[in-house]
Image (tube, grey):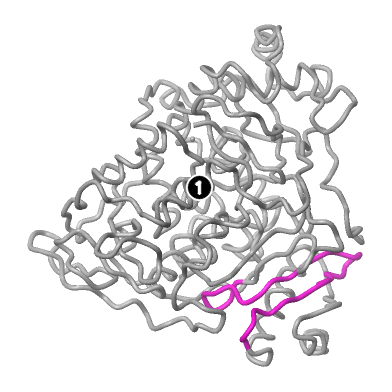
Amino acid sequence: MHRPEDAQPLNVEDVTLDDPAPGADVPDAALMSAAAADDRQPLATAAPPPTRTLATPNTETPPGNELRPDAHSGADIAPKAGSGPDVGSGADVGSGADADSGADVGSGPDARPGPDARPGPDAGSGADAGARVVGGGSVGGGVVDLTLDEARRLILRAQGLLGADARKGGVHAMLRRLGAVQLDTISVLARSHELVAYARLGAVSRPAVERAYWHDPARSFEYWCHAACILPVEHWPLYSFRRRAFRDRKFRWHEVPDGVDKLLDQVRDSGPLMTSDVGGAKNGGPWWDWSDSKIGLEWLLDIGELVCTRRVGWRRVYDLAERAIPADLLAQDLTDEECVTRLAGIAGRSLGVANRTDLIDFLRLKGRFAAILDEALLSGAAGLTPVTVAGWPGKKGQPNAWADPAALASEPRGRHRTTLVSPFDSLIWHRGRTERIFGFTYTLELYVPKHKRVHGYFTMPVLAGGRLIGRVDPAREGTTLVARQVHLEPGLSPAKWAGAFADALWSAAEWVGCDSVRVERADPPELVTMLNAPG
């Protein structure tokens, strides 16, 4: 089926999209401020990082502050509101014009993936003596030096896009590796949470993806992390800091109506329900004209009385947390400090190598919650190792990022994925990070007026050979996958990279049930002939 150029996201009951100004893909002001400050003057100025040995990393994965979800992340997302107490930060998922863009030295468009990361010196004495680490520098000194190539490979492996081990355990294991998978209403080839699984696992069946995310009994739940995300159910206790903050705020993006107690009683008495069971989601007005019932259900979800662990026809099913969440998880009562510290470790492991901005963006922290994260990094409580990544902004002689110590303990090896990447994939959530790692400037032009778009309505980066080589604006016409525009990064050879584009397009086509591919426009133009040539 052909998708109109300016097609709106799928119009179902729970779709709630903002109408930002043209060119929106701009991060929340508070988050931008934090990002800019971080990349000008990274953390670790208060005291030298603690000395630690990397030979015996803790690989245990433990089972965000005012959240304001972004304009085009519409899975039951509410409109932007004014600032409130620390419930979550910021608006634009995978922000656009980022404060730290352009900081990536040595990662220009034609930079080639380097050799396998070199091992560092042997670790100190003890049972694990002889273990090796990625990067140079002193293991005992606590700071590891990484080249940009080494950091990139560690990141790709952490994200499940490098090496055969990434496929083990399927979708369920992938979710735990990533820590969070973003939801979005827009469906071009498929919904984003499906595309994230496809990028890492290949042609896993879409029903299998759905079953892995929403299953009975619950193995995951929906809540606010970077945005509206699917989260592993064992992470339920870690978001109690955000639930408490919402409760203290006593306000959603609408005034919380009277009668929420009656809604809660109705769920308790009648069992799980959808908004259609209590009068519908909307009053019939604009996007954000939610019914009182919808506002009430979302408020009860925000504060943790209700939870969504499954969907029906893309509509949330609300149930009592005490029924859907295992009792041992409900019983855990963590402090704000414990929540943020453990989530910082999860974010660090998911990202592989990250600076403060990246960690803040992953969890959307600000105010006192960002300060808790800072302390967890400085004290070592987050379990991350300070590193210096060549070319990343920072103060001379001080670490400019943190890394998962388990990732540093072995060299990234194996095959790189060749795939289209969802705009809402955690690999590229933070646009400044994307430029810092890949030398790739990316803006989602979804809300840019048609005549101002450069790359297309829903451009998807193309990952190949461990780098982002270009982008595709896809659509479907019947059983044909149409690439409305294909753009190769400047300086790359069409003859060399056309095969990677073809692999990415044909693999995606087969996965969504298409039997042909047609490229309409390309930059450089010769790619059209190359990619449309008979196989």
Tag 1: amino acid: Asp
User: Depth check: 350 or 267 in front?
Assistant: 350
Highlighted range, magenta: 463-492
The percent position of residue 24, horizontal first and vertical second, equals 71, 50
Q: Residue at x 83, y 78 (%)?
A: 519
Which residue is tagged 1? 361
Element under disc 1: helix
| Residue 253 is a magenta residue | no
For residue 234, side relative to residue 477 (left or right): left
The percent position of residue 124, horizontal first and vertical second, equals 10, 64
The percent position of residue 38, horizontal first and vertical second, equals 41, 52
User: Depth check: 18 or 235 in front?
Assistant: 18
The percent position of residue 189, horizontal first and vertical second, equals 77, 60
Measured along the vertical axis of the image, is residue 376 above or below residue 444?
above
For residue 184, side relative to residue 428 (left or right): right
Name the quadrant containing residue 532. bottom right
| Residue 486 is a magenta residue | yes
Measured along the vertical axis of the image, is residue 151 above or below residue 278?
below
Q: Residue at x 88, y 53 (%)?
A: 7
Badge count:
1
Q: Residue at x 76, y 76 (%)?
A: 486
Q: Residue at x 39, y 71 (%)?
A: 391
Name the quadrant containing residue 183. top right
Identity of the residue furthest to the bottom in this view: 495
For the C terminus, give its image quadrant.
bottom right
